[in-house]
Amino acid sequence: GPVTALVPAAGRGVRLGADEPKAFVPIGGTPMLTLAVNGLVAAAVVDEIIVMVPAEHVDRTAALLPPDAPVRIVVGGAERTDSVRAGLAAAGDTAFFLVHDAARALTPPALIARVVDELRAGHPAVVPALPVVDTVKTVDSGGKVTGTPDRGALRAIQTPQGFAAGALHAAYADAGSATDDAGLVERLGVEVRTVAGDPLAFKITTPLDLRLAESLLTARPA
Ligand code: CTP
Ligand code: MG
């Protein structure tokens, strides 16, 4: 069945601190949203793409997307969850969804294909995962350390996250909020499978991340 990609691109980019929303900030001259959509197209496993952008940026968005690609533009919401919900509401019948942050602009197409392969193999929820390199601690509101989870059991989770269409619709039918889509699906008791992530799928969040992305793109073969 068909694969629909939902691309949340409606964030403000507060931590990046640029003078426009993050998805519209260029890397090597090309906006992050354009790079992210190009990656989805290059993976050649996606049938339809829906991008969610801030209301006041809808008009300029079409010109940033490949003219021949099956892309639709919808208005996002106040939180990422609201943006994904808006994309979901605009989607037609599909077998699978990918939810993929525009801010992961350098995601290799091979990772996107890997997630879809696992969906097609019958897994209802698939997320890219990387080992955590730092020790992670829990702290209380005063900053006192309350625990040190075993790092070997921790993973950093990326996008694209893939879902059987029914699972994502069911997850978003509830009013909950989470920092990723799999978090909502987990609450339904759906098993979430990890696949190997890729360091290049990092989320461009801070000015340091942007500098890293710039230098990677300069070094990348066309
Ligand atoms: N996003 C969205 N709608 C929102 C918030 C976030 O579509 N209301 C998108 C962002 O555009 C981004 C992705 O979700 O592609 C991941 O979010 P994040 O990295 O937090 O981006 P921002 O929210 O823009 O950044 P910040 O939190 O620093 O403001
Ligand atoms: Mg944010």
Image (cartoon, rainbow, N blue to C red):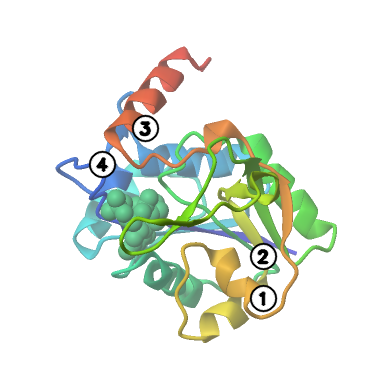
Say which amino acid is labelled 4.
Leu
| Label 3 CB sits under 8 Å from any ligand 1 atom | no
What residue is shown with label 3?
A: 209
Badge 3 vs badge 2, beta-carbon distance below 8 Å: no
What residue is shown with label 2?
A: 163
Badge 4 vs badge 2, beta-carbon distance below 8 Å: no
Earlier in the chain: of badge 1 and badge 4, it is 4
Say which amino acid is labelled 1.
Ala
The correct choice, above or below, for 44 with respect to 191 in the image is above
Q: Position of residue 194 (x, y in %)?
A: 72, 52
Q: What SS does tag 3 mark?
A: helix
Earlier in the chain: of badge 3 and badge 4, it is 4
Earlier in the chain: of badge 3 and badge 2, it is 2
The answer to which quarter of the image holds residue 123 is: bottom right
Say which residue appears at 67% left-offset and 65% top-offset: 163
Badge 3 vs badge 1, beta-carbon distance below 8 Å: no
Say which residue appears at 40% left-offset and 40% top-offset: 34
Q: Is residue 43 left or right of residue 103?
A: right
Q: CA distance from mark 3 to mark 2?
A: 28 Å
Q: CA distance from mark 1 to mark 2?
A: 6 Å
Say which amino acid is labelled 2.
Phe
Badge 1 vs badge 2, beta-carbon distance below 8 Å: yes
Q: What SS does tag 1 mark?
A: helix
Say which amino acid is labelled 3.
Asp
Disc 1 packing (10 Å; few <14; some 14–19; many ≥20): many
What residue is shown with label 4?
A: 16
Badge 3 vs badge 4, beta-carbon distance below 8 Å: yes
What residue is shown with label 1?
A: 167
| Label 4 CB sits under 8 Å from any ligand 1 atom | yes
Q: CA distance from mark 4 to mark 2?
A: 29 Å
Please say whether residue 93 is visible from this viewpoint: no
Earlier in the chain: of badge 3 and badge 1, it is 1
